[in-house]
Amino acid sequence: MGVGISDRGEGRPIAVVVLAAGQGSRMNSDLPKPLHKLGGVPLIAHALHAAGGLSPARIVVVTGHGAEAVEKTVADLAPWAECVRQTEQLGTGHAVLQAAPILADFAGDVIVLYADTPFITEQTLAAMQAARARHDIVVLGFEAADPGRYGRLILDGDRLLRIVEAKDATAAERAVTLCNSGLMAGDAATMLRLLATVGNQNAAGEYYLTDLPALAMAEGLSATAILCPEGETLGINSRAELAQAEIAFQTARRAEMQAAGVTMQAPDSVIFAQDTWVGRDAEIEPHVVFGPGVTIESGARIRAFSHLEGCHVSAGAVIGPYARLRPGAEIGNDARIGNFVEVKEAQIAEGAKVNHLSYIGDADIGERSNIGAGTITCNYDGVMKHRTTIGRDVFVGSNTMLVAPVSLGDRAMTASGSVITEDVAPGALALARAKQVNKPGLAIRLMERLRAIKAGRKG
Ligand code: UD1
Ligand code: CA
C-alpha cells in the first residue's frame, strides 16, 4: 500500500531531527564534536540555523557523547529545540529512532540533519521538500570526488533502490561515485515505523538510517535522491577537516561581504563569524577578527588588527587600528575608538572619542566627550562590577583613573593623572592628584652624589 498523496508535498509541518550523539573520535578531543567552532560558533549552531530556515514545527536534537554540554549549548542557541538522549551510539537509524516517543503524535515530515555537516543551504533543503511531492523518501546525495567511506546510492532512473554503506559494498558497488550526504526526508510516522524494523546485521553491527530507502521500496513506497554540490555536504570528522571547513566558510563569507558592498584591501586576512553583519560601504582593513554577534553599520571603518565580538558600531565611527571591542560595546555615530583601547559593556555616544591606550568597561560616555590617553574605568573591586557614567562634552584628562561607581556631569573636566573616587558635578574641574613641588638645583646635586658613591665603590 502506497502512502496517500496527502502525506507528501510542501506546506506540511516539519520536524527537524539533528543527529549529534556520535563520539567524533577522529577529532581526538575532550570537547564533543558539535561544540567545535566554525565561523566563531559551535558546529551545532550551523545545523540549528539550517533547521530554522525551514520554519519547523519541532526541532529535536539527538545527543549522546558529551550530552550535557551539547544540551546546554542547544538550550542557549535555540531554547525551543528539544533534546533526546541516545545513551548508546548504535547507529544513525537508532539515533533517529530515539526521537520516536516525542514525535509519536506529530503529523508531518521529518528531515534528518547532521550536527557535523554545516554547509547545507536553504535552497537544498527546499529542493528536498519539493522532491517530497513526488516521493515518500528523499535522500540528499552528491557526486563524490573521492567516495571513500561514504554510503553509495544505488539508483534506477530517479528511483533510489537502496543505499549501501562502503563497509558492506561489493567492489562493483564501491565503484559508484554517487554518495549519501546523510540527509533524509519523509513522512514522520512512515520513517519511524520503518526504522523500528531496521536490524544491525551488517559490517558495522549498527542500525543504519540508510536501510530506509530499500525498506520503503519493499513496501511499494518510493524513494529518490536529489543532488547538491559536494562542498555543501562537507562533513567534519577531524581537526584537518575542521580547518578546511573554516577556510571554505571564510572564503564564502568574504565573497558575500564584497557582494554586499564592503571594502576590504586584504580580504584573506579578515576573519568573520557566522552572524557578522556589515553594512554597505563599510571598510574593513587587514587582519580584523570578528567574533560572534557583531553588527557594523554602513560607512563605518574598522582599522587594521582590531578584534570585535558582541558589539555594534554605528555609521561613520572609526575603530582601531589595534582596538578591542568586547560584548556590550555600543559605538555611536562618528565616534572614535583608537589604538590599544578596550571597550566592554559600554555605550560610547555620538562623536565621543577614546583614542589611545584606555580601558572602558561598564560605562556610559555622552556625546562629544573626549577621553584622554591612558584613562581607565576601574570597574571591578575584586568581587563586583560597578558603572562609570560620563555626561556630554566632558573632557577626561590623560591617565585618569575613574574608580566606579562614579559619575562625571556634562561639561566636567578631570585633571590628568587624577584618581577620581567621587562624583563630579556638571561643569566642575576635578583635581585628584598630589600637588607638585619643585626643588631648585636638587636634580644636579643628587646625580653628583650618586656618581661619587659609585666611584667610591670601584676604588
Ligand atoms: C553516514 C551514513 C553514510 C553517509 C555519511 C555521510 C549511515 C549508516 N551512514 O556514515 O551513508 O555517506 O554518513 O557523512 O547513516 N550519530 C548519532 N548516533 C549514532 C551514530 C551517529 O547521533 O549512533 C550521528 C553522528 O554524531 C553524526 C551523524 O550521526 O552527526 C553521522 O554519523 P557517522 O558515524 O559520522 O556516520 P558515517 O559513518 O559517516
Ligand atoms: Ca561522518
Image (cartoon, helix red, strand yellow):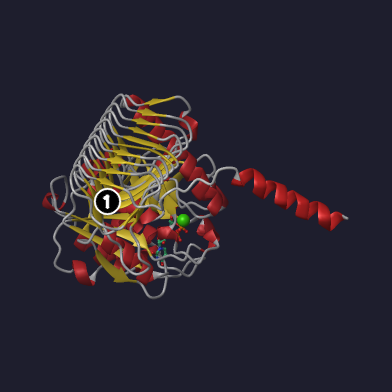
What residue is disc 1 on?
363
Q: Nearer the viewer, residue 69 or 240?
A: 69
Task: Kindly give the residue lying farthest to the left in the view shown.
Answer: 6
The quarter in which the C terminus is drawn is bottom right
- Image coords of residue 314 (percent x, y): 25, 34
Helix, strand or loop under label 1: strand
How many marks can you see?
Answer: 1
Residues 249 and 281: in front is 281
**Residue 429, percent across and down?**
26, 44
Determine whether, in the image, residue 27 is placed left or right of residue 36: right
Q: Is residue 176 visible?
A: no
User: Going 23% across and 54% down the picture, which residue do you hit?
Assistant: 423
For residue 295, which quarter of the picture? top left
Kindly identify the residue that appears in the image at 47 percent across and 44 percent down.
Answer: 245
Which residue is rendered at x = 16% and y = 56% of the image?
Answer: 57
On screen, residue 405 versus residue 452, left or right, reads: left
Splitting the image into 4 quarters, where does residue 276 fall?
top left
Q: Is residue 81 above or below residue 12?
A: below
- Residue 130 in the image, given as x and y percentages of width and height: 22, 41
Residue type marked 1: Ala
